[in-house]
Image: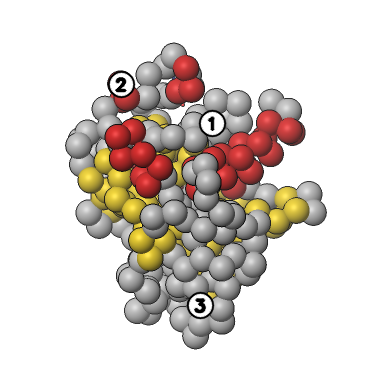
Amino acid sequence: MSLTMQLLILVLLPLAFLLPPGSQAGEIIGGLEAKPHSRPYMACLSIQRRGKTYICGGFLVAENFVLTAAHCNGDEIIVKLGAHNIREWEQSQQTISVCHQIPHPQYNKETTNNDIMLLQLAERAKLNRWVDTIALPRANERVEAGAMCNVAGWGGTSTHCESNSARLQEVDVLVMQDAACPSNGPYHYYNASTMMCVGDPKMGKDSWKGDSGGPLVCGETAQGIISWGPPTPPGVYTKVATFIPWIEATMRRLKP
Ligand SMILES: *[C@@H]1O[C@H](CO)[C@@H](O)[C@H](O)[C@H]1NC(C)=O
């Protein structure tokens, strides 16, 4: 796939998700502000790629590992943890650079299959009431269609964590049957073994908020990663449960 297409995926998809027609840049229409620090696992990624800066979400899965989407890779990534308002200085925030980006070895830029990446942090995060890990599902655990989960993000309408005015926003989303992402049309590359189809089309644009790479949280568990989709729901999330063996093996391998 061409560089242009890669950049389109990185840049346009979050915009498509986050900017319903008529909304203002930097604003999430109908978004609910999260209770400050109610999601201590949330990470804001500031990604440098070929001289440009992009934003993605991510989530802390160990003191020194953040999970995100593989399409959020870059030349350099800085992770901000413990934030509510990423534009302001907050005593809760920890900013840590990424020393090692490990995209899934079978990540396919063209089909967006296996869109998952581990980021090893240069220093361990200090876990406290503002910064904490989230649980991962058991390998191959299933989330049934009809489950209500939620996503959060700072709204990737800006290209930089620091210049984004948004406080953390959240929204509830419905897990759909795989058939709601049919392989004709925009869901051509949907793969039920590695992806989840999430977001009720009847709920419209409100079900699409959050940044690429951010977690789909069902109960207490990070079951999905915001990955790709057309401008309207449902959208496609990476199915985390499929990747548990890879996540565990990779973290074990990189343990200092
Ligand atoms: C779905 O993804 C799996 C895992 O990457 C892969 O083995 C399989 O071939 C894919 N299926 C299709 C139809 O592309």
Residue lying at 61% horizontally and 36% vertically, measured from the top left: 9
Ligand 1 is found in which quarter of the picture?
A: top left
Classify residue 191 by image quadrant. Answer: top left
* Residue type highlighted by circle 3: Gln
The percent position of residue 82, horizontal first and vertical second, equals 45, 73
Secondary structure category for the residue under label 1: loop
Res. 111 in view: yes
| Position of 130 relative to 225 (above/below) | below
Is 83 positioned to the left or the right of 148 in the image? right
Question: Around disc 3, counting alpha carbons within 10 Å, would you say few (fewer than 14), some (14 to 19), or many (20 or more)?
Answer: some
Using a 10 Å C-alpha cutoff, classify the residue at mark 1 as few (fewer than 14 neighbours), some (14 to 19) or many (20 or more): many
Q: CA distance from mark 1 to mark 3?
A: 31 Å
In the picture of the structure, the residue carrying the numbered disc 3 is 93
Looking at the image, is mark 2 or mark 1 earlier in the sequence?
1
| Image quarter of residue 37 | bottom left
Q: For residue 112, which numbered disc appears in the image? A: 1
Side of 232 where 156 appears, left or right: right
Q: Position of residue 147 (x, y in %)?
A: 21, 41
Q: Which quarter of the figure is the N terminus placed in? A: top right
Please name the amino acid that badge 2 sits on.
Answer: Ala
Regarding mark 3 in the picture, which secondary structure is present there? loop
Could you tell me how far apart the alpha carbons at marks 2 and 3 are, in whole angstroms?
41 Å
